[in-house]
Amino acid sequence: MEEDKLTTQLPENAYRKLKEGEEYTPLMSPKKKYREATAWSVIIGLLMTVIFSAAAAYLGLKVGQVFEAAIPIAIIAVGLSTASKRRNALGENVIIQSIGACSGVIVAGAVFTLPAIYILGLDVSFVQMFMSSLLGGMLGILFLIPFRKYFVKEQHGEYPFPEATATTQVLVSGESGGKSFKTLLTAGLIGGIYDFIVSTVGAWTETLSTTVMHWGQVVADKAKLVLKINTGAAVLGLGYIVGLKYAFIICCGSLLVWLVLIPLMGAFCGGMDILGMSFSDAIGLWSADEIFRTYARQIGIGGIATAGIIGIIKQAGVIKSAVGLAVGEFSKKEKGSAAKVERTQRDLSMKIVIFGIVITLLAVFAFFALGGIVNNVWQALVGLLIVAVISFLFTTVAANAIAIVGTNPVSGMTIMTLIITALVLVACGLKGNTGMVAALLIGGVVCTALSTAGGFITDLKIGYWIGTTPAKQEGWKFLGVLVAAATVAGVVILLNKTYGFVGEEALVAPQANAMAAVIQPMMEGGSAPWLMYGLGAVIAILLTIFKVPALAFCLGMFIPIDLNLPLLVGGAISWYVGSRSKDKAVNEARQQKGTLIASGFIAGGALMGVVSAILKFANVDWFLSGWNATWGETIAIIPYLLIIIYMVCSSMKVDKE
């Protein structure tokens, strides 16, 4: 194996659009071979999968947030390779991160759906949960591979890829050391300690609201007008990498819901029945948050689904090309064709991908038909069609969402999947308790497939920037999915027996509760909030007509406003530090340093999220609840302004060299 000494910094065209005829050359030369999938990287990657699957499952069911495992795993990988004095370990670290990241995506797919079965008072076995997660994860990988080249190479510079950017900076800076690593480490320490003090200690509130002032509380009570901003360093860093353009579009969607639609619902919709949509008589007494969770957020779900369908139509050429490429490989007779493809562009053979899809879909059918999920073969076939069609078509939607904002709206797409599944199964004669279990397991397969596809595009983009072999990432990802699925299934059963998901001391499991609330009435003859979904669909269509990115806007309608406004602040900082000088080279240097700082904030916040999860699991409570309730929101603005000032001033302190 011939190894090449690695460059210590990403090329300057790593994040921007390429000029005509320009090529991107990764750190690891396409003409050289490097250590990637070794016994070290695979074993460490699988160990990370087990640990982070358990931690993420507990936190996801406890507070409804599944932390992104890719960044803390990347930090650990760099630390272990440094401690063991492994030279040129960048390729191995990418494999560790890629395998380990299976934990977060499989957990999201499982804990958003499967605990709903327990919540409904029904039962599910280990094998059923394991197979649902495993088959969904495998489909997510297989369906995404044909689109890898489009998203990571052909669309180079078109999307910000915030999580992939932060993880890449961690891996590259950790490998190279020097000023970049010191900048990243300093920002990571500041951001991590800051977020730990906010979320775990509670020295000030994590969310700053206009209700902190008397007039703001009056306006919120009377007119349902309220603005909120998350004061965390990690979300601020995410906004910097997302950039001003997409952050502004996302916030426009959020402001439409919170400043227009929620006040209108609170003022005029009480007790009304509009096109089969019944509004509560007491809606005028509800808070803006309650109106958002119960009604307004559904508009975002309809918008995301419609924007996704529009995106699928627009990308019909890409989908056709990917399918054509896969089918065309069967007609190839020339041997050694794979050798002609550059190492850094070499995917698993499309023959393997197609056989894999066929075998996995047959396994899905067998799981539904023989696993006690449905009553007969026809219902199993219907379930198979739902899984195959939605998982394949919405793979591109999940990848787009991750590429834009770093957040996969998988719960929104899953709710839409559950509604479609429930309608179809009821029409096929499957309803009641059996129907609810079947719909949730089918939804679990789809949810895990979309979550895995969205997360995997991040891994592949990291590999593209660094220069690893895509086929190795793709092949070993299956093993990571297998281990993560087994771990998550076991943890969910253990947590159900230990805490339960219903009752005073139970785990909250907010997404699973939402899924249960959607599926139960439909399986018992009820209906869905079609008016809200339809309104979201109309908004997405109008946005498309006026050439506004509909998916980004609708993500803003679905994601809570306190997580959207910090994106705008971070995006504004990015624009500011990258536009103050008349010298383009200085602006670019400042922008790159700001990206390092933002990546440090995200990495520090993600790592401290793991620490917080461990403390919560151990029942260690350091939260200053009394202090936080009395003074937390009043003083929150001061440290938030300080961390913004640090980010701006530190980013500006660079020169051309």
Image: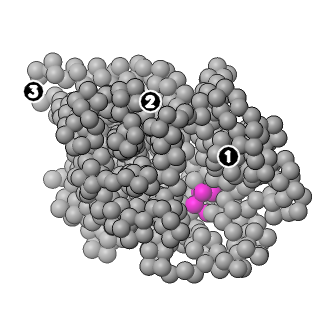
Please name the residue that numbered disc 2 is placed on: 423
Q: Residue furthest right?
A: 215
Please name the residue that numbered disc 3 is placed on: 335
**What span is in magenta?**
233-237
User: How far apart, in angstroms, are the residues tagged by discs 2 and 1?
Assistant: 25 Å
Q: Residue at x 55, y 45 (%)?
A: 405
Please name the residue that numbered disc 1 is placed on: 292
Instruction: Let me know if residue 412 appears in the view.
Output: yes
**Relative to residue 351, is residue 518 drawn left or right?**
right
- Judged by its main secondary structure, the magenta piece is helix
Q: Nearer the viewer, residue 590 or 378?
A: 378
Q: Residue at x 67, y 41 (%)?
A: 296
Q: Nearer the viewer, mark 3 or mark 1?
A: 1
Q: Quadrant of the C terminus?
A: bottom right
Mark 2: which amino acid?
Leu
SS for callout 3: loop
x, y percent for residue 2 = 18, 52
Q: Nearer the viewer, residue 251 or 23?
A: 251
Mark 1 closeness class: few <14, some 14–19, many ≥20 residues within 10 Å: many
Instruction: Let me know if residue 172 appears in the view.
Output: no
x, y percent for residue 81 = 30, 68
Please, is residue 53 above or below residue 268 in the view?
A: below
x, y percent for residue 471 = 24, 42
Quarter of the image for residue 268 reads top right
x, y percent for residue 468 = 30, 48
Q: Does label 2 or label 1 sit earlier along the sequence?
A: 1
**Relative to residue 81, is residue 314 drawn left or right?**
right
